[in-house]
Amino acid sequence: MGKEILHFDGFVCPTHEISAYIDGELEPREELSLETHIFSCETCFAELNYQKEFLNELSHSIKLQGDIELPANFAETIVAAAESSVSGLRKPSERSNAFVICAVLLFSLVFALSLDSGKLLAGTVNLFEKVAALAGFLFQLIYSFVIGFGALLRVVGGGITVPGALSFIIIGVFFVVFLVFARTLLRFRRT
Amino acid sequence: MSSQAINFDSVRTLADGELVINAVAGRTDGFEELVRRYQRPITSYVYRMLGDYESALDVTQEVFIKVYNSLTKYSSEYKFSTWLYRIAHNAAIDHMRRNSMHALSIEAENSDGTYQLQIESHLPSPEQNHERGEWRIEIDAVIKCLPPTYRDLILLRHSRELSYDEIADVTGLPLGTVKNRLFRAREMMRQVFVDRGFSGI
């Protein structure tokens, strides 16, 4: 039952096709071919009736179970949760606008800080020099942050001392791990 | 109040695609109607996949939030229900993977594409179920014991009455694989019934 049925002449009955035939999922050509075979093969004819009965019983029993009961106001709870979700029904253009605004604000802030720091932009007349000065300032900012973080780690680490280059690598690795972790966390929240 | 009632009645007559358009345009009653239409079938499907009521409610909520956030990406070339079941299918599979809920994991498929089915010993015996005339209890128990990939196909076909093409869209499997796995799943169930003494099947 359900296994391949081998005839004396070596022909294997297409029992797996019978299932799809009952579901009405065979191509007309396959259907015709199977019907021709079934009418000439008692085993497949019996198999067809057997499977038909089983599938009817299966569908009927599964449908009898019906859908499960839900808590009261489940739909309202879902809608409220969806509306309060972070991204919501935002258009892609809205998101890109938000990104541009954030980027402009960030650059404005950095620019203001660089102006405040005095000498950085002093004497620079053309745009190229200003951009170069700004890039230098950004690099200085990141460098200071990394060094500061390194100093903090050294304090937290107590007596642990590592050579300068190694500590720099450790900090770099830490940042990469931090970024990967943050990305994974965001992806997990999205699913 | 009456205008709200009229509004609510009007969305009930709309097709799924129209409700999606309404929701994208900012009308939350469109999305709410979609949730009302599909909350029970989706929760039932997820529940039968996971076998745990509370988890099914959580995953269903997760599914609809994802739907809400992805409505702008919905393509009308698919039926909305197919798209929704695809999201539910992925969410249920992700949940099972995260929680390692099954002794037979999705990856436990043999190289020849078959599984060794394990029926839990605490299930009621066939005689007990038969005496009570509750075929559906026996069938429910056997479905629960199927490997997730097979259980999924049985539920989508027999409970949700999806076509093979729709099942392929939902699961992301090739059509031929859907056909073969569905056949194997049914054979597996039939064999279990025979082993457990249900001679009628």
Image (cartoon, coloured by chain):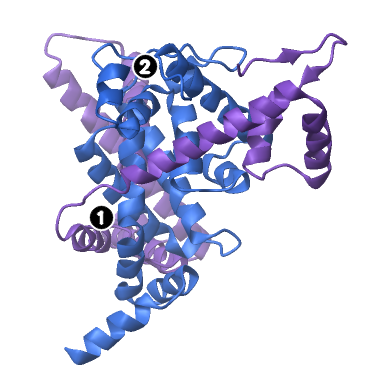
Chain colours: A purple, B blue
Numbered circle sitting on residue A188: none
Task: Determine if residue B63 is in view.
Answer: no
Quadrant placement of the C terminus of chain A? top left
Q: Which residue is mark 1?
A: A117
Residue beneath the point at 44% across and 69% down: B20
Q: Is residue B72 left or right of residue B54?
A: right
Q: Secondary structure at mark 1?
A: loop
Quadrant placement of the N terminus of chain A? top right
Point out the tag, 1 or 2, that comes first from the N-terminus. 1
Residue B5 drawn above or below residue A128: below
Crowding near the residue tagged with mark 2, few <14, some 14–19, many ≥20 C-alpha atoms within 10 Å: few
Residue B105 in the image: x percent, y percent? Answer: 41, 19
Residue A183 drawn above or below residue A131: above
Residue beneath the point at 35% across and 83% down: B10
* Amino acid of disc 2: Ala
Please, which chain is the residue tagged with disc 2 on?
A: A
Please, which chain is the residue tagged with disc 1 on?
A: A
Residue beneath the point at 21% across and 50% down: A69
Crowding near the residue tagged with mark 1, few <14, some 14–19, many ≥20 C-alpha atoms within 10 Å: few
Q: Secondary structure at mark 2?
A: helix
Considering depth in this image, is B201 or A163 the residue closer to the camera?
B201
Q: Is residue A144 left or right of residue B163?
A: left
* Amino acid of disc 1: Ser
